[in-house]
Image (cartoon, helix red, strand yellow):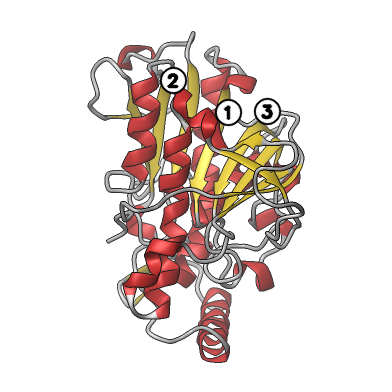
Amino acid sequence: MPWPVSFGKPLSLVLTLLFVQGSIGLLFNALDINYWRCKIKRGRTCPDADVNIYFYNSEERYRQRVDMRPDRGLSYSGWDPDKKNVIIIHGFNGTERKSPMTFIRDAYLNRGDYNVFTIDWEPLTFFPCYLSALSNTRLVAQCAAQFYSPLTHMGARADHTHCVGHSLGAHVCGMISNHLTTKMYKIIGLDPARPLVHRYGSDAFKLTRDDAHIVQVIHTNAGLLGETAQVGHVDFCVNGGRMQPSCTREGRRIRQARCSHFMSACFFAATVSNRGKRFVGVPCTSSCRPLLPFGYGKTVSMGEHTPDDARGTFCLRMADNKRCPFD
């Protein structure tokens, strides 16, 4: 999120003005709104040309676009009802086909026991269109829910299906349950977006622990581009949860924050394999301060291998020597 101002009052003022400007526009327009090449979707009808869902399987490794029309099914695409399912949703100024989201996709494909689905809403969330992206999360969640329901009706077990979202994508995961009769089983939010959401977003439009039976959140830029703890049933603070060590080389503070924000996806991808069980946290405060020195206290694995009954906030250290690409 490369805002051309520093954090603090200037950023808050700019974002507030954009919010007010957008709100006024919404009051006086019944159709889609376009500004700065940005698009605010007014409709809530799916399928939508700007929201695409893709399917990957570990055998063929190429993406297939999922046909969202009601008379179409997944059986032709190689979807295996005996496998678990993961739905991956990118955030602001992102796309499903570039890093770091591809790291998560490939980590699941390498396991071999998952059907992998990605939701791409790039046309609705590119820079500098953060305001419109916030509004468009409602449509993306609607389309994701209309995909999720047929998936479960075809035989996908709810407790074997989870949503992984980064930044605004984490909030989209949370909003899916607004459109379901039964909330999702598990959501993993990767540094859920904070700008404007924490101040203006109601619980219906952001990730909370009420959105799924199990909500896990990984913090890498808490309080800046990412929400502060504690959001989920279990939260993990990596390397203090606020600014990642390798990102301090990025120069400007906004670049450091953006780098740290994207590191949540890389850290999570590292936990997906069976070797990921070694990434464990120790209990800490909701502000990411350890209760005991590292190496003491009950440990809990982060990410894919977190026990379903884990509760609380945990801190851990992870090496980030290899910079996580985010451009």
Element marked by disc 2? strand
Look at mark 1 in the image and give the residue it sits on.
305
Query: Disc 2 residue type?
Result: Tyr
Determine if residue 129 is in view: no
| Image coords of residue 165 (percent x, y) | 50, 46
Q: Is residue 6 left or right of residue 65?
A: right
How many neighbours does mark 1 have within 10 angstroms: few (below 14), some (14-19), or many (20 or more)?
some
Mark 2 neighbour class, 10 Å CA radius: few under 14, some 14 to 19, many 20 or more: many
Q: Is residue 229 left or right of residue 87?
A: right
Mark 2 and mark 3 lie on one chain; the one further toward the N terminus is: 2
Q: Is residue 106 positioned above or below 285 on the image?
A: above
Q: Which residue lies under the disc numbered 3?
A: 307
Residue sitting nearer the eye, 226 or 152: 226
Which numbered mark, 2 or 1, is in the foreground of this view?
Answer: 1
**Secondary structure of residue under mark 1:** helix
Residue marked by disc 2: 114
Are dots 3 and 1 in contact, CB under 8 Å? Answer: yes
Q: Residue at x 33, y 72 (%)?
A: 250
In the image, 123 versus 327, the foreground residue is: 327
- Quadrant in which the N terminus appears: bottom left
Q: Disc 1 marks which amino acid?
A: His
Image x and y of residue 15, in percent? 53, 81
